[in-house]
Image (tube, rainbow, N blue to C red):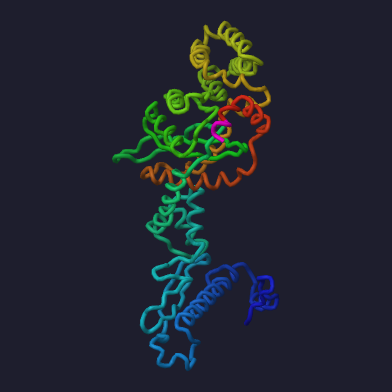
Amino acid sequence: MTIDKPQGKLRKELIEELMQHYQNPEDLIGENSLLKQLTKALIERAMEGELTHHLGYEKHSPTGHNSGNSRNGKSKKTIKGNYGNIPIEIPRDRDGSFEPQIIPKGQTRFDGFDDKIISMYARGMSTRDIQMHLEEIYGVEVSPSLISTVTSEVMNEVKTWQSRPLDPIYPIVYLDALHVKSRNDGHIQNQAVYLAIGINMDGMKEVLGMWISRNEGAKFWLNVITEIRNRGVQDIFIACVDGLKGFPEAIETVYPLTQVQLCIVHMVRNSLKYVSWKQRKAVAQDLKEIYSSLTVSEAQLALDSFSETWDKQYPTISKSWKSNWENIIPFFDYPAEIRKVIYTTNAIESLNMSLKKVIKSRGSFPNDDSVFKLLYLALRNATRKWNMPIRDWKRAMNHFLIMFEERIEAIQ
């Protein structure tokens, strides 16, 4: 059989010949399927071609007489591929210098198989689930150690990603956390995984990094912000957070000109936490009067009014808003139509929701590396959809260009 390749496609006649015995999907992708047999035949034919190239002469050619090396039978090997276990025969040469390229020595998995393991792992499947899936669909028995080996190779990619250079300016950076259970010193503990998402000058979202901490505080956040600075970020205009302890102080130390904006969504959510169900709607509406005000002075009047109405029943709400007032009001410096870009961490919370779905099936993680490994793969999947600027970015950026003109020119 020959392959007609004017456009890199198989001849129609060849496809029809191969498919003449096809009756059901099992004939195509089952245990003794056409694709499995074709994969085996092509691999073995490719290795025969590699050996011919290595020796420098065709099989049975007189050129090989007294050449110093020759074909020396075949060895058997089973590889794990996309269509199950595939037994193959590997040609050998007499002096043992031949090393196949398509299936190198020591390799037991064909290209694409590892990707399937990583893809399933990234979607939150446990090692046992992956084992069962591969055996059920492909008839391949895979050990837990193999799955661990394949997924552990991702850690080198994680380390490269976590230390990659960043842009010099991110107009907005959002910070938020999700919680996982991880084993530490023989005990399972709750840990916070913090994510930083930057909005670059083009309005595109980018995950800047991921950090794990058991003890949140100024020292931890100083290390995070210093790392971001060392990776090339010279300026951040606004940092939007949900009330993380020690973060404003850390930002001020490394980026003294950055405005810290508390997430209004978090403020409202925390305020309603202890409000009775009957009164939640009324309290939420009065809180909305505060953050939907046109000016800071109007918002202050709305807060005073809220205090008069609700302090007897819920005194901690107005107290919380007043104590955080300086970090609540920065968004009032911007036009109403772009305030939502600034005062909510929704951009990062939607990402966290997708990550929580992935880790939901995990009771706990054996170590921090396993946390990083899974969340990095899940992040990689989720961020593939980030191909558009965030909403109303042009208006926001035009405002930033006026407000922070000198800072932008100093860096560019």
Residue 278 in view of the camera: no
Q: Position of residue 10 (x, y in %)?
A: 66, 73
Quarter of the figure with residue 280: top right
Q: Percent from the top left, x then y, of residue 269?
A: 54, 23
The residue that appears at 40% across and 71% down in the rendered structure is: 105
Quadrant where the C terminus lies?
A: top right
Q: Residue at x 46, y 71 (%)?
A: 101
Task: Provide residue 376's location: percent of width, then percent of height.
Answer: 48, 45
Image coords of residue 154 (percent x, y) = 44, 52
Q: Residue at x 68, y 30 (%)?
A: 395
Count of picture labels: 0
Residue 332 is a magenta residue = no
Q: In the picture provided, is 402 more to the left or to the right than 229?
A: right
The correct choice, above or below, for 365 with respect to 116 in the image is above
In the depicted structure, whether residue 362 falls above or below residue 177:
below
165 or 356: which is nearer to us?
A: 165
Magenta-tinted stretch: 408-412
The quadrant of the picture occupied by the N terminus is bottom right
Q: Is residue 58 left or right of residue 215?
A: right
Q: Nearer the viewer, residue 108 or 50?
A: 50
| Placement of 359 over or under 411, stated as above or below | below
Q: Is residue 230 visible?
A: yes
Q: Nearer the viewer, residue 126 or 245?
A: 245
Magenta stretch: dominant SS?
helix
Relative horizontal placement of residue 137, taking residue 371 as reference (left or right): right
